[in-house]
């Protein structure tokens, strides 16, 4: 049986996108979501919140998505949490490079808010042996 996805950490530096995504994930997906506006905060929050999944913006100031991913992977407390990048950089080569870094999937920006929760649930189910 696939464990239910309940806790998501969403990391995005743009306030409007954080708001829209939070609404899509909490209202439509019924997930418990914790929001962060920087990679630095995300690394700390991941230890406290203990998300089952992290959704991470790629282009952020100071500590970008790849740097945040490395920090999460380097910490035994957060190394096993699956990460999805959310980015406008979705050319096949870029996606390949992101997957090579160790993310489990890449969701393209802009995304359809009404379909985001289903998209995330689909990734979760695939990771956990479902369809």
Image: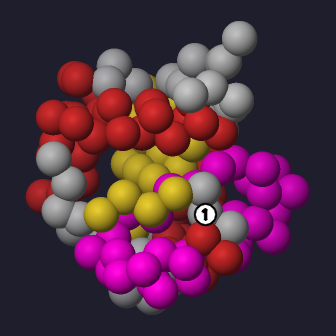
Residue 119 percent coordinates (x, y): 36, 39
Determine the image quadrant of residue 37: bottom left
Residue 123 percent coordinates (x, y): 51, 41
Give the residue at the far right of this rendering: 76
Above or below for 76 versus 87? above
Q: Determine whether, in the image, residue 41 is placed left or right of residue 101.
A: left
Q: Which residues are magenta?
A: 70-98
Above or below for 47 versus 70? above
Q: Residue at x 62, y 26 (%)?
A: 130
Above or below for 92 versus 29? below
Q: Residue at x 42, y 39 (%)?
A: 120
Above or below for 75 versus 59? above
Q: Residue at x 71, y 11 (%)?
A: 1
Q: Determine whether, in the image, residue 79 is placed left or right of residue 110.
A: right
Q: Element type at marker 1?
A: loop
Residue 93 belongs to magenta span: yes
Residue that numbered label 1 is attached to: 103
């Amino acid at each position: 049986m696939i464990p239910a996805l309940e806790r998501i950490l969403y990391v995005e530096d743009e306030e409007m996108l954080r708001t829209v995504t939070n609404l899509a994930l909490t209202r439509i997906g019924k997930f418990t979501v914790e929001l962060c506006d920087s990679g630095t905060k995300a690394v700390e929050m991941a230890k406290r919140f203990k998300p089952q999944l992290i959704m991470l913006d790629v282009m952020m100031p100071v500590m970008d998505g790849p740097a945040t991913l490395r920090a999460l992977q380097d910490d035994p407390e957060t190394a096993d949490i699956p990460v999805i990048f959310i980015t406008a950089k979705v050319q096949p080569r870029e996606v390949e490079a992101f997957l090579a870094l160790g993310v489990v999937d890449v969701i393209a920006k802009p995304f359809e808010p009404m379909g985001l929760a289903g998209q995330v649930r689909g990734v979760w189910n695939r990771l956990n042996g479902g369809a």
